[in-house]
Image (tube, helix red, strand yellow):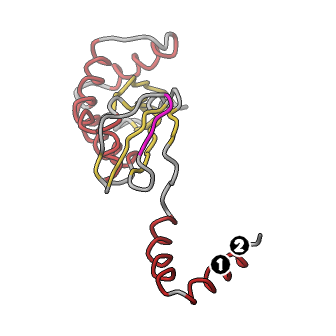
Amino acid sequence: MHAAYLWALCLRICMRNYKYLICVLIMFPLLIGCDASPIYSVRLDEEAIITQNGDIHGDPKKPGLHFKIPILQKVHKIQIHQVRFLTIPIPNSNSLKAKIMWTVKDSKKFFIAKQKGNISEIFKSTVTPEFYKIISEYDLDTIVQISREQNKDPEFTNDARDRILVYIQKPVDDFGIRIINTFFEETR
């Protein structure tokens, strides 16, 4: 049947009995944006956060099949293994940039941070000033050397690179973010 026909039929029934009309007017807005299914699945690369009345309900759900209270609870899935990138230009250099790789470490903290706005912008505005502080302690030759060594061996590490990673990790711990690596690249 056509949806318009069903609506017309529903309204005709409701007009005969005002109790039905009141019931429809109350229930319709509730059902429009709500997921009425009690079952949901979480993929291997996800964790799910359940909210009830806007508050987090319980711990993050791991991969598998789960149950929730229909209409009252909402499922928010978070990609926990997705690697994201932030590219930052190196100050005082036209040919160097840093690429920071990050992922989700704590889905509950990440969800809370995400509710405050665009998580990429929050991450960028938090990490960039800290990155500039720590990078200013090194001369460009050190950064160029790290860049060249990383081009030869992506697993390359030294004290300077490790110190940079530790320093920029601290301010994003509260957002449930883990910084995986920092690559320095020369652009020509």
Q: Quadrant of the N terminus?
A: bottom right
Report x, y in % for residue 38.
48, 45
Q: Which residue is mark 2?
A: 3
Q: Does any portion of residue 114 appear in the rendered image? A: yes
Does residue 188 sit above or below 57 in this rendering?
above
Does residue 9 sit above or below 112 in this rendering?
below
List the single residue furthest toward the right: 1
- Name the side, left or right, on which 178 lies relative to 94: left
Residue 48 quadrant? top left
Q: Nearer the viewer, residue 124 or 116?
A: 116
**Amino acid at the residue labelled 2:** Ala
Q: Which residue is mark 1?
A: 7
Mark 1 surroundings: few (<14), some (14-19) or many (≥20) residues within 10 A: few
Read off the magenta span. 64-68
Identity of the residue drawn at 71% across and 78% down: 4
**Amino acid at the residue labelled 1:** Trp
- Name the side, left or right, on which 27 lies relative to 2: left
Element at badge 2? helix
